[in-house]
Amino acid sequence: MCLLKTIDPKFFHSEIPYKPMGKYVHFLTIRVTESYPLFQTDEELNKAKVRAGIEKKTPISRLSMFKRKQSTPERLVGRELLRNYGFMTAEECEYNVRFAMNNPDCIIYGFAIGDSGSEKSKVVVDTAYSITSFDNSHETFTLNAPYENGTMSAKGEKKELAKGKTKGKLDGEIGTTTSRINQQDHIRPQVFFPSIITLTDPTEAGFLYVFNNILRTRHYGAQTTRTGRVRNELLGIICADGEIVSNLRWTQGIYDLIPEDIVQSIDPLEEDLVINKATQAIQELMSDEFIVHTDFIGEDFQPLLNEVKALTRTEEGIKSILNKANEEAKSYFKKHIEKKKAKSNI
C-alpha cells in the first residue's frame, strides 16, 4: 500500500536492493542559521577558499559545513523517533557504540562494526558552503564563565592574595577574579548554506524517513544544547538515474544571480531573494545535465511537501512511516546481513 499519492511509485523500489540499481532522489535544501552555530574543527570555524561564482571568478573564503555536521544530527533525530515509538531501544542499538544492524537507521544511514560487518550509507551528503563570504558571515564573541553569584569574582582569603592572586572587591571583601574568559568565532544568523542530500535506491518508506528527518532537525554543529539553531528550507526534490551538481557549484550559481552590492554587503541576505535565486540556479544547472531526471521544484513541489507534512504531523502517520521502514530494514537484515554472518561462522 502506497503512503503517497502525489508522486509516481516508479521512483521507488518495492524493497531495499542489495546492489546499486541506479535510482536517486536528491533533496534540494537551503540551511538557514537562526542563532550562532559553530561548524568547527580544532577550535576554528571551518572555511575554504574557492571561486565566488561560476561566472564571477574572484576567489573568496566561504564557511564550510562538513558532511558529518549535516548527516549526524538528522540521523540522531530519526533514532530518537524510533525509540519514542518503540521500534528500537537504547540497549540494543547505541550510536557509535553498538549497532543493532536491523533497523531503518542502520540500514539507511549505514554502520561499520569492524569484523562484525558494515553497511554503506544510502544517504550521500557533501560539504555545504555559505553563499556569502567568511568575513560577512561570522563574528567574534568574548565568552566568560561567571561564578554562581553572577560576577567574575569570588570571595578569597588573604593567604590567597599572598600567593599572587588578583585583587578584587566583592560585597566589601577581598576576592579573586576569574581568568575564564575566552574568544570564539560564531556563524551569524541568516547565513545560507545550499545543500543537496542524495538518497540512493529509495523505497517509499525510506524516502519518507529521510524526508522527515530533514524537516525535523533543528540543531547542527557544536554545543547543540545551547546554540546551533538551523532551519531547513526544502525547495524541491529531483528524481534521477544519476548524481547531479555539487553543493559548491549550486552555491556559485546562486552567487552569480544575486546583485553584487547585495551579496557583498554586511547585511544579511533576504530569504525570499535567496530562495528565488536558488530555485533559478538549480533549474539552469539541471538544464545542462545529461542524465534522465524528473524535477519537483517550486509550485510542482508544493503538493508533495504538503502531503508529507500532513502525514508526519499526526501520530498515526508517523507510525505508519516508521513501521513500514522498520519492516523493510528487518527484511533486508535477514536476507543480506544475518545470512552473511551465518555463512562466515560456518
Image (tube, grey):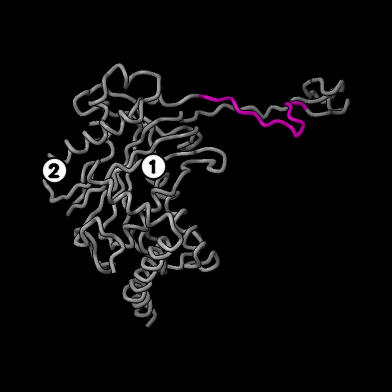
Position of 217 relative to 46 (above/below): below
Q: Quadrant of residue 195?
A: top left
- Residue in front for this viewpoint, 304 or 92: 304
Q: Is residue 290 magenta?
A: no
Give percent across and percent down for residue 66: 38, 41
From the viewer's perspective, tell me whether residue 314 is left or right of residue 141. left
Position of 172 relative to 99 (above/below): above
Position of 284 relative to 6 (above/below): above
Instruction: Please give the residue where the numbered disc 1 appears in the rendered image.
Output: 232
Q: Is residue 144 magenta?
A: yes
Count residues near mark 2 (Cα–Cα under 10 Å), then give few for <14, some for 14-19, many for 20+.
few
User: Which residue extends farthest bottom?
Assistant: 346
Q: Are marks 2 and 1 in contact (CB under 8 Å)?
A: no
- Of the 4 image quadrants, the one containing the N terminus is bottom left
From the viewer's perspective, tell me whether residue 6 is left or right of residue 71. left
Instruction: Please give the residue where the numbered disc 2 appears in the rendered image.
Output: 289
The region drawn magenta spans 140-153
Residue type beneath disc 1: Asn
Question: Residue at point 33% right, 71% down?
Answer: 332
- Of the 4 image quadrants, the one containing the C terminus is bottom left
Question: Residue at point 40% right, 20% down?
Answer: 267
Question: Residue at point 49% right, 64% down?
Answer: 85
Give percent across and percent down for residue 118: 37, 64
Assign a secondary structure to mark 1: strand
Give percent across and percent down for residue 301: 26, 46
Disc marking residue 340: none
Marks 2 and 1 sit apart, C-alpha to C-alpha, by 25 Å
Count residues near mark 1 (Cα–Cα under 10 Å), then give few for <14, some for 14-19, many for 20+.
many
Label 2 or label 1, whichever comes before in sequence order: 1
Q: Quadrant of residue 199?
A: bottom left
Give percent across and percent down for residue 197: 31, 48
